[in-house]
Image (cartoon, rainbow, N blue to C red):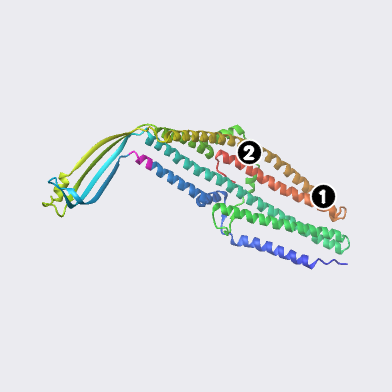
Amino acid sequence: MKQVANPSFLKGLTFILSLTALTSLSQKSYAQEVITIQQAIDKTLTNNLQVRQSKLNESLSEENLKQAKMALLPTLNGSIGQNMNWGRNQSASGLFENNQRYSLSGNIGTGIDVFNGFVKINRIKENKYLVDGSKTATEKVKNDLILSVVTSYLQILYNKDLLKAAQDQLTVAKQQLNQQQQLLDVGNKTLADLSQSKSQVATAELGVTNAANALSISYLTLAQLMDVPSSTVYDIQVPLIDSFKKPSAQYNAEEVFSNAMNQFPDIKLAAINTAGAKISVQVAKGNLYPRLSFNASYGSNYFYSYNAAGANATFHDQIKNNLGKGLGLSLSIPIFNGLQARSGVTRAKIELMRNETNELLAKNTLNKVIYQAIADLKAAEGRYESTTNAFAAQKDAFYVIEQRYNVGLVNSLDYSTALTNKNKAEIDTIQAKYDLIFRAKVIDYYLGKQITF
């Protein structure tokens, strides 16, 4: 008696396959751009808002440095004022009388610090370090983003391979289901065998769905890193097979660490912050010294009155006759100001110690991370070799089981177990391959090498 497949099962299967085919067709039809790893990095560094924000911090630091340099120049200020006085005032004859007097005054003055404890000079040095620090901070942001892009790019490659493996597994499961149906029709298989094949198809369909979802999410993650619209449809360039040659795991951790110390942004930034903090201590100490300033002024007045006994002198004559000039030196000696200056020195010294500790911490962290990265790379190399050998063995084992199953020498449970083991071994190999590539790229990242595939 011929076994008829469950109608609802067939409808569900048709819907899932149609949806998968439509998604695949849509991805291929509308993909306008295929990007390489370098293009993905370039887009990220161009569009990412973190980079833009860090560059704005650079501009602000440069402007602060300009201001610190300009502070060395003399000040020059002008003023003009209109004054009105009324009531009892002393007249030219020496008598007091009620009158109204109006005057117009103008003045220009300049001043410069002759000595202020080298605060301004040290402030310039301090701001130079701040400029270098802001630029290095931008390098650090870019460096971190590059590693994130590489991770996301590899995740897409991994998910693409995983989806292909899942689709291949689904194809094999369907072929097996069709074969089991035919064998059942001629009485060589049981309903249990057919049910087992249906279960394999359902499991494979779920694997395709999960892999397709994971691939979509990884595309979205990379798009967000590149700061392009999340709806952007794109594909990535899959490296040539030759590019997937096993990376070398022969690295000396101490050599990698030594090279990274000279160019890794995190270390450079920590060192710059420490050097800047040392100058900040000198700036704070400058406030303990006396301040000597020079000033000069030049101005005149014009007076006019409505009830003066005589006519007012002309504007030119008054400006000329009332002309005043002045030179002066002032010395300000800090004696007691609530211990603000000494407290400022103490705070600057504490900040210096904090930065020195941060620098040491950054170096220790880098050392640990690199040694761990080298160990991870070697472990990934071993895992890749093991999973490759295991996958080859599982494929051979499955081939034998499949041949025996087709002639009725092996039951459906043994066949299902062999297929599951092969599928798992294939997925493990894919994971191990991309884990090995990623671990190798991490070492390149710490060495400052360009990330390519």
Q: Residue 418's x, y, as percent?
A: 80, 50
Horizontal and vertical percent position of residue 186:
87, 63
The image quadrant that residue 22 belongs to is: bottom right
Q: Is residue 392 visible?
A: yes
152 to the left or right of 340:
right
- Tell me what residue is drawn at x 84 percent, y 51 percent: 414
Q: Is residue 68 magenta?
A: yes
Tag 2 and tag 1, C-beta contact below 8 Å: no
| Farthest-out residue, left | 310
Q: Amino acid at mark 1?
A: Val
How crowded pointer 1 is (Cα within 10 Å; few <14, some 14-19, many 20+) is rated as few
The residue wearing badge 1 is 400
Nearer to us in this view, 5 or 315:
315
Residue 239 visible, this angle: no
Q: Which residue type does callout 2 highlight?
A: Ala
Image spot of residue 105 (x, y percent): 22, 48
Main secondary structure of the magenta stretch: helix
Q: Which residue is mark 2?
A: 373
Tell me where the magenta segment starts and ends, as one range. Answer: 67-72
Check disc 2: other Cα within 10 Å, few if <14, some if 14-19, many if 20+: some
> Image check: 299 left or right of 244?
left
